[in-house]
Amino acid sequence: MNGVAGNLEELRRRIEAASRRVGRDPQDVKLIGVSKTVPAERIREAAAAGLRRFGENYVQEASRKIEALGDLSVEWHFIGHLQTNKAKQAVGRFHWIHTVDRLSLAREIDKRCNAVGKPLPVLIQVHLGDEETKGGVSPEDLENLFDAVQTMEWLEVRGLMAIPPFLENPEAVRPFFRDLRRWLDRLRQKALHPEKLTELSMGMSHDFEVAIEEGATFVRVGTAIFGPRRS
Ligand SMILES: *Cc1c(COP(=O)(O)O)cnc(C)c1O
């Protein structure tokens, strides 16, 4: 067993190598440690080893940990399916929301941001492939949702996120990553602020290197940092 610090060191090496393979600056790939089910003390350990961004899937679980770790200066990213009635709690706690996938949710987040007077960077989650992975706007509805979200007062739409189907061979996931990047390119054509539309949140423990080769700017890595989750 390596421990969290050793795992992080190894990950940084792999992120750097994948970036170099395609001529990217490794600094442009931001690592998010996915800490769902991981106790606060292990998150603290990862922060001590230099990890600055954490991803959580459940508002309730995250709220407890964010409070317990309030002394750390880290960024919290919401990456789970967000119920509209949890938007208020999420807005007060998270620095980014990756999973805006419907108009009603976007409106509710915007309203809650207005109430606290703070803008929030968000990503639109796109449903790629016909797996039964939950969440994500269908590609057909993406442009309409984007048009609506980009004119909202408090939401700063910064890019796209996807959870492609899990496939044994990470190479088989490449076309999904490529698709997401193409969608981002397409949206940039019609964006009011194309220079702000820069982020692609894609790639997990088993396929993040392929995602980086295809342009990921956020990779969401859980088990490769914290070990297997007890379910
Ligand atoms: C759990 C989760 C991850 C991390 O998955 P690993 O395979 O443990 O790296 C990434 N993104 C989302 C949306 C998740 O729910």
Image (spheres, rainbow, N blue to C red):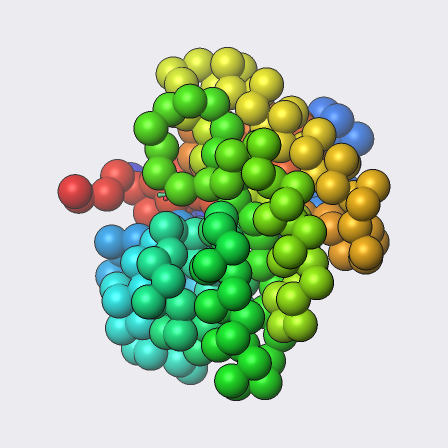
The outermost residue toward the bottom is 116
Nearer to us in this view, 78 or 20: 78
Name the image quarter holding the C terminus: top left
Give the image location of residue 128, x and y in percent. Answer: 50, 28
Dividing the picture into quadrants, the one containing residue 67 is bottom left
Q: Is residue 160 above or below residue 94?
A: above
Nearer-the-camera pick, 213 or 151: 151
The front one of 26 and 170 is 170
Look at the image and tell me whether residue 217 can be seen. Answer: no
* Ligand 1 positioned in quadrant: top left
Which quadrant holds the N terminus? top left
- x%, y% of residue 115? 51, 85
Question: Residue 183, image x and y in percent?
Answer: 68, 34
**Please, is residue 92 above or below residue 79 in the view?**
below
Q: On the rendered structure, is 182 left or right of 160?
A: right
- Rendered location of residue 185, percent (x, y): 76, 36
Q: Tell me the residue at 46%/41% (across/down).
A: 136
Total numbered labels: 0
In this rendering, would 50 be left or right of 85?
right
Picture residue at 64% right of the left edge, 45% below the top: 144
Q: Is residue 155 visible?
A: yes
Quarter occupied by residue 215: top right
Q: Residue at x 51, y 55 (%)?
A: 103
